[in-house]
Amino acid sequence: MQISPNTNPSVIVPGNASNASAVDGTALGLHGENAATATPVTPTPTSAAPLRRGLNNWDQPLQGDISGAQQALDFLEQSAAQLRNLKADLSARLANRQRADGTVDARVRQFSNTWRSRSAASGGTLDARLKFSNKTSTTRFTVRGMNIGNLRTGGREVLAISLGGGQNLRSVVLEPGLSDEEIAQRFDDALAPSGVRADLNEDGQLEFSTPESSWTNVRDTIAVQGGGIRFPTGQLNRVKAEAEAPAVDPDSWQTGDMEGIRATLQQVVQALAQVEQAIASVHTALNQVSARVQEATPSDTTDGMDQVAQNFVSTAKQPGYQSLLSITSALAGISRERVISLLSLR
């Protein structure tokens, strides 16, 4: 008996290379030229722009900005709810002259605890004045003796400033004729490496700022040595640093008598107005971030994917190995979980 050789080639089914297996061409329904000469087809978009992959291509700072704004909103909305409850209880106490039952005091303690968690709860996006920023929250402060009026007058003097109690001194040279802006700039240049910045505030006074986490150390260790003109010569002398007053100070609220309750109610109303204003400010910032997200969405992705889809349809319509390879390549690696994940993005 004469055995004729099998002329059907083996075909590698597309998929994971480690699991690739040889399949008889006949089993795939391929015959003749299509079985022997088919080559893989890789559809490519006509546009030269690379395809991008959705959220993976978002600007990372954008995602951080959104997360920071959402944390700030969570804290502010919780604070607003507690202040509204406290306002209602205080008003009821004044209207009915009810005896103390501990409810108002508990409300004050609750909000005080919430306020103390401001920095951590907001992810460091809200400072003590409820100013929102996706940068690290800072504490603004002034230093006794370092006001523009005092620094502007007098002859040339070199100030040595110590921060953190170390020996790493920073020098600021003051000279006659310097403008207020130049004075602030010299302090800023000298102190910036130590994590303290200087500028002029809205009132034109010299104001410093440092990360909120560093404020206690700066407050307790700042010292200055002068030349005897504006600051004493000799050894470093501790100077007093005072932080900007916080927007809300629940530790000062009193509920022991009607006068205290009345004053506290007024402060609670003011605090609630500031919190609501901060909420509006954060919503504005969040809307701006959303606009940036829209602008960052690649415009060429849709056109590129349309071209890939058209190429796939054209190839799939052709009978033979090219059509089969296009379909199996498209289906390789697709699972039920991946389909559900993609559909959830719609």
Image: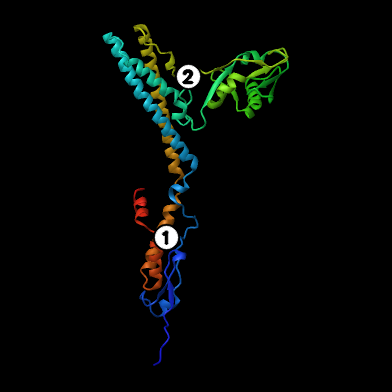
The quarter holding residue 171 reads: top right
Marked residue nearer the N-terminal end (1 or 2): 2
Q: Is residue 12 left or right of residue 216?
A: left
Q: Amino acid at mark 1?
A: Val
Residue drawn at the location 39% of the way across and 17% of the way down: 270
Q: Position of residue 120 (x, y in %)?
A: 46, 29
Mark 2 highlights which residue?
246
Q: Is residue 133 above or below residue 234?
A: below
Q: Can residue 180 be seen?
A: yes
Q: Position of residue 324 (x, y in %)?
A: 38, 69
Residue drawn at the location 66% of the way across and 24% of the way down: 166
Which image quarter is the N terminus in?
bottom left
Task: Classify mark 2: helix, strand or loop.
Answer: loop
Q: Crowding at label 2, few (<14), some or many (≥20) Cα neighbours within 10 Å? A: few
Q: Work out whether residue 121 or residue 317 is closer to the camera in this orientation and state it.
A: 121
Q: Position of residue 55 (x, y in %)?
A: 44, 47
Q: Crowding at label 1, few (<14), some or many (≥20) Cα neighbours within 10 Å? A: some
Q: Amino acid at mark 2?
A: Pro
CA gap between label 1 and label 2 equals 58 Å
Q: Residue 308, labelled with which disc?
A: 1
The reply to whether the C-beta atoms of the residues labelled 1 and 2 are less than 8 Å apart is: no
Q: Position of residue 119 (x, y in %)?
A: 47, 27
Residue drawn at the location 36% of the way across and 73% of the way down: 319
Task: Classify mark 1: helix, strand or loop.
Answer: helix
Q: Work out whether residue 256 or residue 84 is closer to the camera in this orientation and state it.
A: 256
The quarter holding residue 223 reads: top right
